[in-house]
Image (spheres, rainbow, N blue to C red):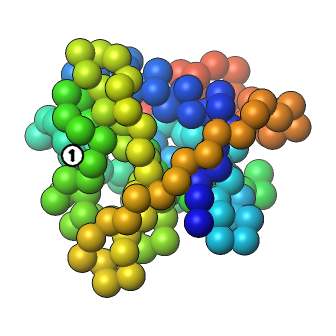
Amino acid sequence: MALRIDENQKRLVGSFSEESYPDECCGFLLGRRSGTDKEVVLIMPTVNEQVRTEKYHRFLISPEAYLKCERYAQENELDILGFYHSHPDAPACPSDFDLKHAWPWYSYIIVSVRKGQTSNVTSWVLADDRMSFEGEVIESNPYSPEEQDVASRPVESQEDRTWD
Ligand SMILES: [Zn+2]
């Protein structure tokens, strides 16, 4: 079981995390299932609802944002494979809050941002007993023009990908 992610999309996760620093950012991982692996071809930033009330090490995606993303995924024959979020000045390990709010099967990418720079990127999946996370291997895919076409078609710029 591994999470395969296009190199460009992985880089984007890092840059969005750095842009949001010192706040925590979050978003969706879209792609396709491939056997027991997941293949991320597009990341989709969204608003971290939690930032408005409590800062740091928490992220919350609204049901409306989830529905919008799900619709977008369906239209583009993609699946929501998971989520990413950043941990400003904290390790790339899930917090108790992350564990409490995690759903089974989905991949959770966590980006540790130290002093505004990406220092570590990890991925996690809820264990079968839902009491803990298991680390997931991240494999970076080389650039694929076909996938990139899907990823870039609906948006002109990175900003347009944020639904606010
Ligand atoms: Zn977290």
Q: Quadrant of the C terminus?
A: top left
Q: Quadrant of residue 79?
A: bottom right
| Secondary element type, mark 1 | loop
Query: Does 83 sit above or below residue 85?
Result: below
Position of 36 with respect to 18 (left or right) is right
Q: Position of residue 146 (x, y in %)?
A: 88, 37
What residue is rendered at 64% in x and 59% in y? 38
Instruction: Decide which of 67, 34 is in the foreground and name it.
Output: 34
What residue is rendered at 71% in x and 40% in y? 141
Total numbered labels placed on residues in the image: 1
What residue is rendered at 11% in x and 40% in y? 54
Position of 40 with respect to 131 (left or right) is right
Q: Residues within 10 Å of mark 1 (few under 14, many from 20)?
A: many
Q: Is mark 1 within 8 Å of ligand 1?
A: yes
Q: Quadrant of residue 74?
A: bottom right
Instruction: Decide which of 49, 15 is in the foreground and name it.
Output: 15
Instruction: Decide which of 13, 92 is in the foreground and name it.
Output: 92
> What is the residue that sits farthest to the right in this orientation?
146
Per the image, the residue denoted by label 1 is 58
Query: Does 157 sit above or below residue 154?
Result: above
Residue type highlighted by circle 1: Arg
Q: Position of residue 2 (x, y in %)?
A: 59, 59
> What is the residue that sits farthest to the bottom in this orientation?
129
Q: Quadrant of the N terminus?
A: bottom right
Q: Is residue 162 visible?
A: no
Q: Position of residue 65 (x, y in %)?
A: 45, 50
Q: Is residue 87 visible?
A: yes
Q: Position of residue 102 (x, y in %)?
A: 33, 65
What residue is rendered at 42% in x and 64% in y? 125
Q: Quadrant of residue 8?
A: top right
> What is the residue that sits farthest to the left in this orientation?
54
